[in-house]
Amino acid sequence: MAEAQDISARRLKNGSATLLARTVATTAPIYPRRRLRAEYSVYLLDDRDPDGRTAVFSHTSVSLVVGEVLYGPCKPGPLWTVDFIGYNFKHALEVARASRVCRRRADAIWWNTF
């Protein structure tokens, strides 16, 4: 699972969008370390311009606490349906905090820096 895949989902106002992922270096899971940074950004998409997007205020390059979103061992379970190995990254983006996103298409991007 070395590649990211685009996903599409509908979220209701005052709900949340949760990203589950398995982050790996080569083939081994990445464990939380002090040098690691995790961030996310949300962009509103432009229905008239396929390359157009606008950053959502207070949701651009938001730092996350690595220990809260990245786990040591992978966690299998009912939320993860990709395989039996599981996920080691989980972040819930509260849609209520990004109220402009509720009525429009948006792109949320998460990344980890080593």
Image: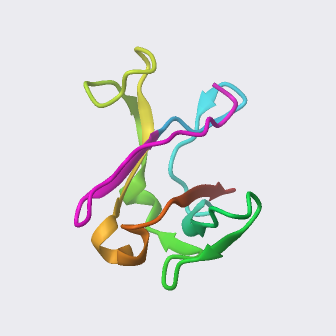
> At 60% across and 59% down in the image, what residue appears?
36
- Quarter the C terminus occupies: bottom right
Residue 42 located within the stretch drawn in magenta:
no
- Quarter the N terminus occupies: top right
Of residues 97 and 34, which is closer to you in this image? 97
Instruction: Determine which quarter of the picture holds residue 108.
Output: bottom right
Residue that sits furthest to the top in the current view: 84
Residue that sits furthest to the front in the current view: 48
Residue 50 horizontal side relative to residue 69, left or right: right
- Residue 92, given in percent of the width and then of the height, sits at 34, 56
Residues in magenta?
1-20
Instruction: Determine which quarter of the picture holds residue 6.
Output: top right
Compared to residue 73, the image places residue 95 above or below, namely: below
- Residue 72, given in percent of the width and then of the height, sits at 43, 40
- Count of residue discs: 0
> At 52% across and 43% down in the image, what residue appears?
31
Of residues 112 and 96, which is closer to you in this image? 96
Residue 7 located within the stretch drawn in magenta:
yes
